[in-house]
Every structure is written in structure tokens, then in C-alpha cells.
């Protein structure tokens, strides 16, 4: 009896840590999917929740045995995949619509210092067409920017063009296609539909393992 109570007492912190990790991980995945920095309290919260979940799961493995523990881990992985996958797909959908609906700011730019950067590999181990990179120079509110980007063919020095800008004045090299929106919407809906199912199966597996007494 004492061993059972000792094992079960780890179920509550493990479940709480999993809930926090699932909820905090979703906005972290959202930010990561858009190449935004993930740090501060959110990163520490995810790390702490993961540490607690792993620590609490070790006594549960000894108490439940290999088979039930493996089943619990499978449903945990599926639940996290569904929730975080839905967050990733939703972020891509929202970002694509925002970018396509709102034309990004553009400014004049000058292309300089085009150079060969390498050669494309070809089948059989040889080298094919050359690859090129050019430096784009532009200014925003008096601040100068420059960035080297790959190009199909080199431009003459002083070639004038326009570049799209993101927040902060950095260069945007491309815009996502609206053709991807239905794909991301389907993935997001699948994740949102699957998450409650996986959560219920996880809870059922925990009951079968007699974690709640």
C-alpha cells in the first residue's frame, strides 16, 4: 500500500507539468515557426515543466511497469504533436494571410558587389552552373542597411531595384503563397480535432494504470 501511494503521488505533478508544457509550448512553437525569438519567461517555463514531467515520470515507470508506461508516453507524444502541430499550422496560416493582404513596405535599393559564390553539384559528382550573390544597399529613416542575397544572374554595379522590408528595416526576400493556406488550415483543424481524442486516451491509459487510485 505504501509503495502504491508513493507511486501515485507522482501522477499529479507529472500531469500538471504536462499541462503546463502543452499550453506554454504552443505559443513557443508559434513564435519559432515565424522565426521570432523564443526566450524569457516562456522558455524557462517550458524547460521547468519538461524537467518536472521527466523527473516525475521516472518513479511512475518503476511503479506502473514497462508496458503501461510506454503506452502513457505514446499518448503524451501524440498529444504534444497535435497541439503544437496545430499551433504551427495556425501560425503559418495567419502569417501568410497577413503578408498577402497587407503589402509590405518597399524602398529603393542599389545592387553592388555581385560575385560568384560557388557551383551547383550535378549528378555524378561534378559541378554545374555557377551561383551568384549580390549586396543590396538601402536606407530607412537615415539608417543604412546592406545584405548579401543569392541571385540567379549577377547585376552590374549600381543596378537599381526595390526591396520589401519587414519590421526593423530588414529585407524580405519573398512572400508566402496563398496556395499553402488550405494545406495549413487542414493541418490545424486535424491537430485541433485530434488533441481532445489523444487527451482522453491518455486519461484512460492513466486510469487503466491505476494512477488516480
Image (cartoon, rainbow, N blue to C red):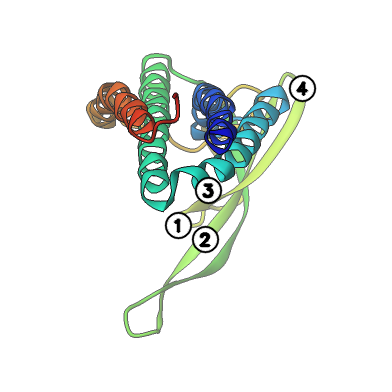
Circle 1 sits in a helix, a strand or a loop, which is it?
loop
Left or right placement of residue 103 versus residue 12 in this view = left
Return the disc, 2 or 4, that comes first in the chain's sequence: 2
Q: Could you tell me if residue 185 is visible in this image?
A: yes
Q: Looking at this rendering, what residue extends furthest in the top direction?
A: 102
The percent position of residue 151, horizontal first and vertical second, equals 48, 52
The picture quadrant where one finds residue 121 is: bottom left
Return the disc, 1 or 3, that comes first in the chain's sequence: 3
* Dots 4, 1 in contact, CB < 8 A: no
Marks 4 and 3, how far apart in space? 64 Å
Q: Label 1: which residue? A: 153
206 vs 131, nearest the viewer:
206
Left or right placement of residue 95 versus residue 8 in this view = left
Picture residue at 42% right of the left edge, 25% below the top: 87
The percent position of residue 33, horizontal first and vertical second, equals 49, 33
Q: Label 3: which residue? A: 62
Return the disc, 4 or 1, that comes first in the chain's sequence: 4
* Dots 1, 2 in contact, CB < 8 A: yes
Marks 1 and 2, how far apart in space? 6 Å
Return the disc, 4 or 3, that comes first in the chain's sequence: 3
* Dots 1, 3 in contact, CB < 8 A: no
Mark on residue 132?
2
Amino acid at each position: 500500500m505504501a509503495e502504491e501511494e508513493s507511486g501515485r503521488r507522482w501522477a499529479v505533478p507529472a500531469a500538471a507539468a504536462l499541462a503546463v508544457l502543452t499550453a506554454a509550448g504552443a505559443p513557443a512553437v508559434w513564435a519559432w515557426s515565424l522565426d521570432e525569438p523564443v526566450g524569457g519567461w516562456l522558455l524557462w517555463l517550458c524547460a521547468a515543466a519538461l524537467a518536472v514531467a521527466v523527473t516525475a515520470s521516472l518513479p511512475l515507470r518503476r511503479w506502473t511497469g514497462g508496458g503501461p508506461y510506454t503506452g502513457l508516453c505514446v499518448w503524451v507524444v501524440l498529444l504534444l504533436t497535435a497541439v503544437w502541430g496545430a499551433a504551427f499550422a495556425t501560425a503559418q496560416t495567419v502569417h501568410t494571410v497577413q503578408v498577402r493582404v497587407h503589402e509590405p513596405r518597399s524602398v529603393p535599393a542599389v545592387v553592388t558587389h555581385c560575385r560568384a559564390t560557388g557551383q551547383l553539384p550535378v549528378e555524378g559528382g561534378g559541378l554545374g552552373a555557377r551561383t551568384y550573390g549580390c549586396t543590396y544597399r538601402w536606407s530607412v529613416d537615415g539608417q543604412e542597411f546592406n545584405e548579401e542575397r543569392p541571385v540567379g544572374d549577377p547585376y552590374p554595379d549600381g543596378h537599381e531595384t526595390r526591396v520589401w522590408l519587414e519590421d526593423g528595416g530588414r529585407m524580405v526576400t519573398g512572400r508566402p503563397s496563398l496556395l499553402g493556406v488550405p494545406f495549413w488550415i487542414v493541418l490545424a483543424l486535424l491537430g485541433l480535432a485530434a488533441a481532445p481524442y489523444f487527451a482522453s486516451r491518455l486519461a484512460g491509459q492513466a486510469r487503466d494504470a491505476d494512477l488516480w487510485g
